[in-house]
Image (cartoon, rainbow, N blue to C red):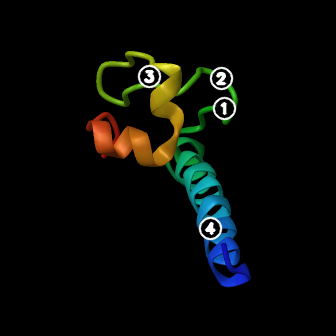
Amino acid sequence: MSSYHFLVTVVFVFGTIIGSFLNVCIVRLPKGESLVWPPPHCPHCKTPFPFYDNMSLRGHASGYLP
């Protein structure tokens, strides 16, 4: 793998991690909720997400996250 592809991959991975965290901040902080507890859940029915849907891209692909 060339250094360009490696750099693109690293930027993509860190971008999704940072974007996922910022999404949590944007959704929870205006409501006065903690960033740590409760664990990730559906905002409508409060059902907790399975651990494997906490990965931002997989969660969106499976339809759990808007």
Residue 30: x percent and y percent?
Answer: 54, 48
Q: Are marks 2 and 4 in contact (CB under 8 Å)?
A: no
The amino acid pointed to by label 3 is: Phe
SS category of the residue bearing label 4? helix
For marks 1 and 4 on the same chain, the one whose residue lies earlier in the sequence: 4
Which of label 1 and label 4 is nearer to you? 4
Mark 4–mark 3 distance (CA, rounded to whole Å): 26 Å
The amino acid pointed to by label 2 is: Trp
Mark 1–mark 3 distance (CA, rounded to whole Å): 17 Å
Task: Report whether 21 appears left or right of 44.
Answer: right
SS category of the residue bearing label 1? loop
Which of label 2 and label 3 is nearer to you? 3
Task: Report whether 14 appears left or right of 38.
Answer: right
For marks 2 and 4 on the same chain, the one whose residue lies earlier in the sequence: 4
Residue 51: x percent and y percent?
Answer: 53, 22
Q: Residue at x 26, y 38 (%)?
A: 63
The amino acid pointed to by label 4 is: Thr
Rendered position, 60 above or below 50: below
Mark 2–mark 1 distance (CA, rounded to whole Å): 6 Å
Which of label 4 and label 3 is nearer to you? 4
Q: Are marks 2 and 1 in contact (CB under 8 Å)?
A: yes
- Pointer 2: what residue? 37
Residue 17: x percent and y percent?
Answer: 63, 53
Q: Nearer the viewer, residue 15 or 21?
A: 15
Circle 2 Cα neighbour tier, 10 Å, few/some/many (<14 / 14–19 / ≥20): few
- Pointer 3: what residue? 49
